[in-house]
């Protein structure tokens, strides 16, 4: 659900990069910020998921997550992934096909991590994001937006929260979808993903030196929006 304060701030043409750990609420926060400032929201994870769906449908990744790198790299040259908004929020497209639902399935989630470690895939996604960000007024969320994709972004946020609180939030989300969720299993999975994201060779998750930390362990979405508005007002005098 989108929370809006509607304070009508005159925010200048900037790029807002939001990075952070899994299940810190990055995408909900980024979407709310985009809506509040009338910016475009770009979900970088959706592009990694889109490449994963493409690789699966074309047999470029097998059951054991072995990747046919030459075939995938050749395919990336013509793969058209982009976002379209027809009044129902930004949706991910592969050519003329909306793939928003398919990229959120468990099968895609299970294969996206190995795909996201491939250097060719990362440079494909980076290229797309830089193209979309040319006109500024965008909010992007991911793991390496402020460090690699837009190191010159005018505002960088690094999101974190207490692991147990993140695990509780994630477990509630899973339960709402009707999935079983043991809190200790969820916590273990989160900590494993934090480790993999922070230790991979290409573009590991790390806080940019000039990023501002947002620890939302005990904050509502409304409080987070007030926090960013204060920050933007102070920094950009708007
Ligand atoms: O945010 P998400 O769960 O939709 O991201 C899907 C995957 O893509 C996840 O395994 C992390 C990876 N990812 C990444 O490596 N770099 C980004 N900028 C965004 C996502």
Image (cartoon, helix red, strand yellow):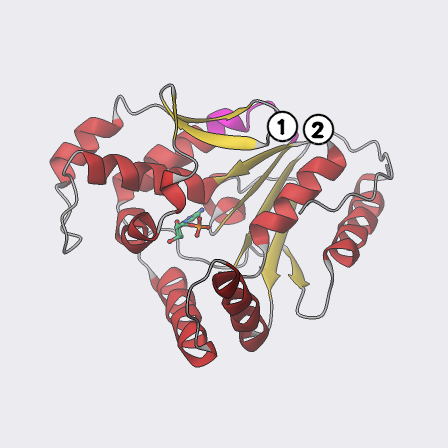
Q: Look at the numbered disc 2 and give the secondary structure of its residue.
A: loop
State how far apart marks 1 and 2 are (Cα).
6 Å
Residue 133 highlighted magenta (yes or no): yes
The reply to whether residue 48 is visible in this rendering is no
Within-10-Å neighbours for mark 1: few <14, some 14–19, many 20+: some
Of residue 109 and residue 159, the one placed in the foreground of this image is 109
Within-10-Å neighbours for mark 2: few <14, some 14–19, many 20+: few
Position of residue 159 in the picture relative to residue 94 (left or right):
right
Residue that numbered label 1 is attached to: 136
Residue 224 occupies quadrant: bottom right
Position of residue 150 in the picture relative to residue 190 (left or right):
right
Evaluate if marks 1 and 2 touch, with contact meaning CB atoms under 8 Å apart.
Answer: yes
Image x and y of residue 94, in percent: 36, 26
Residue 182 occupies quadrant: bottom left
Image x and y of residue 67, in percent: 15, 46
Q: Kindly report the secondary structure that dominates the magenta region of the rendered protein.
A: loop
> Up-down: is 31 above or below 26?
above
Residue furthest to the front: 178
Image x and y of residue 66, in percent: 13, 51
Position of residue 1 in the picture relative to residue 195 (left or right):
right
Of residue 53 and residue 19, the one placed in the foreground of this image is 53
> Up-down: is 177 above or below 47?
below
> Is tag 1's residue or tag 2's residue first in the polypeptide sequence?
2
Residue ID at (78%, 54%)? 222
Position of residue 13 in the picture relative to residue 42 (left or right):
right
Image x and y of residue 78, in percent: 26, 21
Q: Is mark 2 within 8 Å of ligand 1?
A: no
Residue ID at (76%, 30%)? 12
Over which residues does the magenta segment extend?
130-137
Label at residue 28: none
Residue ID at (61%, 49%)? 28
Residue that numbered label 2 is attached to: 13
């Amino acid at each position: 659900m989108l929370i809006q304060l509607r304070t009508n701030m005159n925010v200048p043409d900037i790029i807002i990069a939001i990075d952070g750990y899994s299940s810190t609420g990055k995408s909900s926060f980024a979407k709310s910020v985009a809506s509040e400032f009338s910016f475009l929201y770009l979900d970088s994870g959706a592009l990694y998921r889109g490449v994963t769906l493409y690789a699966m449908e074309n047999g470029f990744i097998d059951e054991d997550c072995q990747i046919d790198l030459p075939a995938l790299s050749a395919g990336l040259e013509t793969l058209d992934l982009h976002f379209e908004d027809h009044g129902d929020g930004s949706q991910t497209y592969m050519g003329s096909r909306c793939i928003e639902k398919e990229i959120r399935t468990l099968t895609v989630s299970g294969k996206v991590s190995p795909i996201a470690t491939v250097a060719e895939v990362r440079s494909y996604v980076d290229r797309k994001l830089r193209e979309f960000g040319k006109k500024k007024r965008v909010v992007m969320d991911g793991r390496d937006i402020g460090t690699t994709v837009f190191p010159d972004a005018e505002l960088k946020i690094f999101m974190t929260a207490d692991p147990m609180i993140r695990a509780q939030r994630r477990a509630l989300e899973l339960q709402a979808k009707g999935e079983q969720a043991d809190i200790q299993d969820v916590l273990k999975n989160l900590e494993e993903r934090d480790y993999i994201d922070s230790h991979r060779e290409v573009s590991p998750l790390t806080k940019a030196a000039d990023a501002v930390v947002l620890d939302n362990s005990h904050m509502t979405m409304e409080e987070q929006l007030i926090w960013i508005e204060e920050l933007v007002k102070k920094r950009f005098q708007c």
